[in-house]
Image: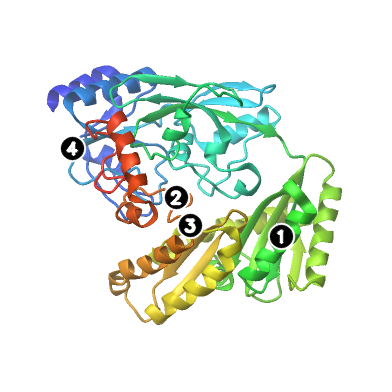
Amino acid sequence: MTELIERLQRLVGVAHVLVAAEDQAPYLHDWLGKYHGATLAVVRPGSTDEVAAVMEACAAARLAVVPQGGHTSLSGGATPDASGRAIVLSLSRMNRIRAVDPVGQTIVVDAGIVLARVQDAAREAGLFFPLSLGSEGSCTVGGNLAANAGGVAVLRYGVMRELTLGLEVVLPDGRIWDGLRALRKDNTGYALRDLFIGSEGTLGVITGAVLKLFPQPTARATAFVAVADAAAALNLLRLSRARCGDRLTAFEFLTSATLEMILRQTPDIRLPFPALPEAAVLIELSDIGEEAALTARLETTLADAMTEGLASDAVVAQDGTQAKAFWRVRESVSEALVREGRALKHDISVPVAEIADFVTVMDAAVGAALTGIRPMVFGHLGDGNLHYNLMRPLDMSEDEFYRHGPRITRLVHDEVTRRRGSISAEHGIGQLRTAEMPLCKAPLELELMRQLKRTLDPHGLMNPGKLLPGG
């Protein structure tokens, strides 16, 4: 492979082909430390043309390619396997804002740009890019597209697929598909764009995107609301939608156990309630107009919720500082979970109306299957996406707990499938859930997906071992 390494160095520069173990190390493990791999080289192209040249060289050598963005995958989707028979293609150098159109309300960006920079560029143009994630300071647009990221504002703005107008993609053989069209209406055949969004790098390398922008909200109103359980939270969601319409931007749910864990693992965080509630909802409204009017609407809605018995307490943020403190509670969940210990993580979605029943049924089922197991449930209630995480019983070692993992996860995913839900709502399949794809995809669906894979990637070089069982 020496000849190939030298060719790659000529294509992108010696400094951008990393072959030393210490230089490669940061690229070879996932964010959670669950997966570790090996690579022939980490290649960092600086342009779409360089990506195309690298892909052409790898195709000729029949060498696999693992695309990598901000390295924040929670399912091992951007981590190579241990064989060392692949290159890691890092898009970190491809981080440009290519164009901003304030009239058409679009932004064209490189795939390696960090999400927070897109948000900043939109803000500087007097506009707004709504995708918001806990990892927005490090995750990249390419990774967001590869996993079809969601986040906290899906309720109003949709997932990444709905925020994207066009793509630029380098195919496995090095050809470039220029689909960077800023069109909101285009009925000229198959939506090729949608094949690559959510494909987790298994069909090609996304190198650029045209993203939708929106008017910058001038008013926000945020509240933390104590509720009895998920059923009460769903009723509050119904009332909030009826009273606030599409001003309802976020509706985040956290159980008492999750809140207690956050407080224990992040001592400087405080809840705005006198006592720990059974569950809580973080609500945010946004709009164009006066903040006082929006806050009044939220206060009236919550007063009615209290009257109807849907909430036991509610605190509306009085300023931006308090609103940020409320959001910090929600944004601290992932770090608190890491500090708490390894968990069985389930990123699931079910029909919104079934969430409360799902939680009740599932808590009982996992409790019966393993005494002392601790559900930590939180997520985006408004769009049906729950993070149903399970911590070990306090009297059990992590190794023993993980021996029960496959059995417990099968219980969760069987219940999700029974409700025609999804075993991956926003984190992707990666290498974490490939074996379980037959649970949620009919044989015909999997065969169609494999046919697409064979058509675009006949030699199976793109991100092997991810997304498709046996792929």
The crowd level at tag 4 (other Cα within 10 Å; few <14, some 14-19, many 20+) is some
Examine the rendered structure and indicate whether residue 102 appears above or below residue 305.
Answer: above
Is the Cβ of the residue at disc 2 closer than 8 Å to that at disc 1? no
Is the Cβ of the residue at disc 3 closer than 8 Å to that at disc 2? no
Location of the N terminus (image quadrant): top left
Give whichever of discs 3 and 2 has the lower sequence position.
Answer: 3
From the viewer's side, name the closer residue of 374 and 259: 374
- Which residue is disc 2 drawn over? 427
Give whichever of discs 1 and 4 has the lower sequence position.
Answer: 4
Secondary element type, mark 3? loop
Secondary element type, mark 4? loop
- Please indicate, yes or no, whether residue 265 appears anywhere in the rendered image: no
CA separation in Å, label 1 and label 3: 21 Å
Is the Cβ of the residue at disc 2 closer than 8 Å to that at disc 4? no
Q: Amino acid at mark 3?
A: Gly
CA separation in Å, label 1 and label 4: 52 Å
- Which residue is disc 1 drawn over? 238
The quarter of the displayed image where residue 323 is located: bottom right
- Which residue is disc 3 drawn over? 421
* Image spot of residue 395 (x, y percent): 37, 82
Q: Amino acid at mark 2?
A: His
Location of the C terminus (image quadrant): top left
